[in-house]
Amino acid sequence: MTQRVDLSTVMDRLAIDAVVTGYAVAVDDGAWTDYVDLFTAAGRADYRSAGGTEGPAAEVARWLAETMRLFPVRQHLIVNRRLDLQDLGGYPGDRARVQADYLNPMRLVGGRAGDDGGRAVDAPTAPNFVAGGRYVFELVRTGEGWRIEGVTVHEKWRSLSGDLSGG
């Protein structure tokens, strides 16, 4: 490979990482327009393994907007990202796949906001909900940059009240 190809691969990896991070931030912040903008026009999301829906990104965003109202505080942690870029004989292609583990703690409606800057605080009426699993992102390079063609959630466990043991 030439230095130009190596640099292009590094730039692709950084751009793809920004899309995956943008996905988590959009869901956590309830930025549903940003969420949809991360997808191609035909992009789809599949949350069925987590008890959710599957369909076009815009429809899933509407479902998420309604569902996430139950969780005013949420924070995705997306880690252990394994990125595979399409290889066209030593040159990067226009497709990529990312498998990434997630830990997703959320606070259910009913938490109290105190003198802590508006963050939810522990309250018996608002247990934590925590889920963990793996995302599989299928991405494609478009004229606007890398976009999600599909994302599938593979939930492995969930817990109510913040017990991270998976029980």
Image (cartoon, helix red, strand yellow):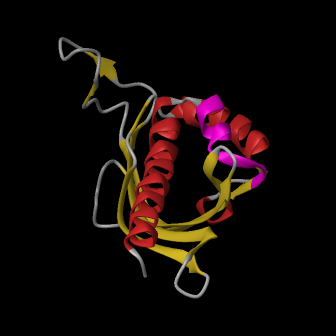
Residue situated in front as seen by the camera: 132 or 88: 88
- Give the quadrant of residue 154: bottom right
Q: Quadrant of the C terminus?
A: bottom left
**View extreme (left): residue:** 115
> In the figure, is residue 142 to the left or right of 10?
right
Up-down: is 148 above or below 97? above
**View extreme (bottom): residue:** 89
Up-down: is 12 above or below 2? above
Would you say residue 167 is visible in this rendering? Answer: no
Instruction: State the residue at coordinates (59%, 33%).
Output: 34
Q: Which residues are magenta?
A: 33-43
Would you say residue 35 is visible in this rendering? Answer: yes
Up-down: is 6 above or below 110? below
**View extreme (top): residue:** 115
Q: Is residue 75 magenta?
A: no
| Residue 138, horizontal then vertical, whole percent | 63, 66
| Residue 70, horizontal then vertical, whole percent | 54, 33
Instruction: State the residue at coordinates (46%, 71%).
Output: 5
> In the figure, is residue 102 to the left or right of 31?
left
| Residue 99, horizontal then vertical, whole percent | 49, 71
Instruction: State the residue at coordinates (35%, 40%).
Output: 127
Residue situated in front as seen by the camera: 93 or 70: 93
Q: Is residue 38 magenta?
A: yes
Residue situated in front as seen by the camera: 37 or 113: 37
Up-down: is 89 above or below 84? below
Instruction: State the residue at coordinates (62%, 44%).
Output: 38
> In the figure, is residue 106 to the left or right of 150?
left
Q: Quadrant of the N terminus?
A: bottom left
| Residue 2, horizontal then vertical, whole percent | 41, 77
